[in-house]
Image: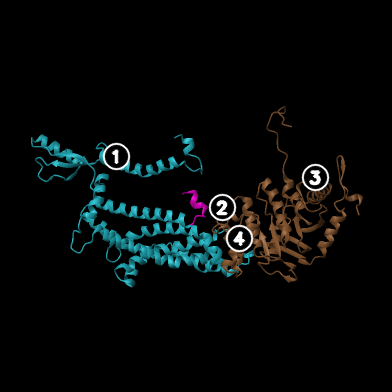
Amino acid sequence: MASAMNDIAIPGQLLPSYREQSPAVRARFERLKAREVILTVSGLHKNFDSEGKTTVALKDINFNTHRRELLCVVGPSGCGKSTLVRILAGLEEHSAGDVLLLGQPVTGPGSDRGMVFQGYTLFPWLTVKKNVMFGLEVNGHGKLESDREAMQWLQLIGLEKFADAYPHQLSGGMKQRVAIVRALANQPRILLMDEPFGALDAQTRCRMQAHLLEIWRKIDITIVFITHDLDEAIFLADRILVLSAHPGQIQELIEVPVPRPRSVAQIVSPEFLATKARLEQLIYSARHDPGEEDDYPIVARMTNVTDNVE
Amino acid sequence: MASSTLFRVLRPLSPRAKLVIGILSFVLPVGVWSLVSYVPQIWHPQIMITDPGSVSYLDVGAHLARDAYEGEVADAKQQGRAPPKGVPANPVYLPSPGEVARAFYTSFTTPPETKDGQWLHQSLWHSIRIIFWGYVISSLIGVPLGILCGAYAALARVNEPFIEFFRYLPAPAFGALMVAILGIYDGPKIAIIVIGTFFQQVLIIANTTRKLDPALLEAALTLGTRSRQLLTRVVVPAILPDLYRDQRILLGWAWTYLIVAELIGTTSGITWFITQQARFQHFPNVYAAIAMIGIIGLGTDMLLAVLGRRLFPWDRSLAKFA
């Protein structure tokens, strides 16, 4: 399976190919692909029209996710990964192609697809519990039943003590935990997450990733997770969809060879490093068109020539 | 306190500094007023006669311009007559803080000067009723219309250009028309308050509604909220604290139309009191009545601010200025 082309050398160590899977991992992927398809995206295009000019944001996107899969989408800024997830949520319309949830075309937002945003979108005027009850109530569940279910969800994430607190009294990580169960309370088929941990500090982010995996292991949910953090993608994902920018296209759908259950220690494992090297190669070397990030100038020296810091 | 801690851009003050400076904001103008009133060397362009002497046209208490007084004194001395005596005084239209403070009390205890006249508290109560009904009628239509204009671009487009035009028309200009339509009593006065408030109200509330974070709407949509539920479930609760703040500002706005409104048709309320007192040159009473309007306005607003913090415990922008 491993071809020489895909071996990436780093000093003192020859990494295996990111395509090399241990028997356990391979068996897991076989089981995963045997499960039913939840989401089908085929021939998806998205164009933006502005000032008479048409920009292609997404071009010919095709992929499936299976039940209880955790799919991460990565790509450089401007690859349209946020647009993609917003189309899946039904918040934006696509220009061509199909988005099917269990075979049914997606026509607009709905409670069968939950979403967690990067910004904290908890309703500030509702307490934590009422935030979680919101989706249940608008979908016709009674107050008592919603109340009981909301408390169960809060217990699941250990925030039942904060049921009557307002969102502004919570830390960023707690807010996102509430946002996750608020989306899950509707029992959606798929949970869409648009860089949900992007605004958190590094430590909280790490704990949230482990927490998300814990939730995902315990309930029947399929997750599509958008991120620009490659470590996060590898740590969380079964498969990683790599997009390129201008236009947003699929470069590769990578099966992550890191075995589960995942732990922080795996970040230095050969499989992890090999996957990361491949992602970096795809994302950072493929930048041939002059984007904004290539335009950083050499800064003129404004100190004495002998006064060097490195 | 060092200026370095008092003058920092967009930084809050310490609670102590806040209190002291807040008190100063009233003490300073009253201080200037006191200086002008009680220090004879400052301004005092007139002389109040305490003894007319030999000048036949002067009475005790009459005000005379300083140079006219000096002329009379010089004439009298030259002719060997008794010179008039007097003390430096300010014109009658600027009473001292003490006089106004006294008037504040006595204006409530003085019975009306004419038989059909009203006590001050009756005048005030009448004015408050005019404001209340004008503001309520304006809000009953203006608030829902403002929210709808903010939420739906089509409604904004059909309403706002005309409202933008109409809000430049001075409300008092409709006085005569309103009297013709609504009679001479309270109707036209309330109508002027409504005209003065309503058009600003729609535009301000529409703008407040448009400032709503669209991410909250998207979050609600992905939770399965149907678009007709959005207004009641998300838009209104989300903007409520800002709406409340707008309504407080607009209530102040309504007060500023009061005097003009009460002059229309039969003069009534606090305006009637003020014009009556000015006619009799009871200027301390005039100032007291004007100050009363300020106190009622500020008092209501402070009350509403406290109530607002109770009503919206989750609102952060209120807490910042609390």
B318 magenta-colored: yes
Q: How is the image coloured?
A: by chain
Q: CA distance from mark 4 to mark 2?
A: 19 Å
Q: Which residue is depicted at the point 18% across and 58% down?
A: B113
The type of residue carrying mark 2 is His
Out of A191 and B130, give the one closest to the viewer. Answer: A191
- Graded by Cα atoms within 10 Å as few (under 14), some (14 to 19) or many (20 or more), the crowding at tag 3 reads few
Do dots 1 and 3 share one subunit? no
Do dots 1 and 4 share one subunit? no
Q: CA distance from mark 1 to mark 3?
A: 79 Å
- The residue to which callout 3 is attached is A268
Residue A179 appears left or right of A287: left
Out of B182 and A199, give the one closest to the viewer. Answer: A199
- The boundaries of the magenta stretch are B312-322
Chain B, chosen colour in render: cyan
Q: CA distance from mark 2 to mark 1?
A: 49 Å
Q: CA distance from mark 2 to mark 3?
A: 37 Å
Do dots 4 and 2 share one subunit? yes
- The residue to which callout 4 is attached is A151
Q: CA distance from mark 3 to mark 4?
A: 39 Å
Residue A271: percent from left, percent from top: 83, 49
| Chain under disc 4 | A
Kindly identify which numbered label has been placed on residue A168: 2
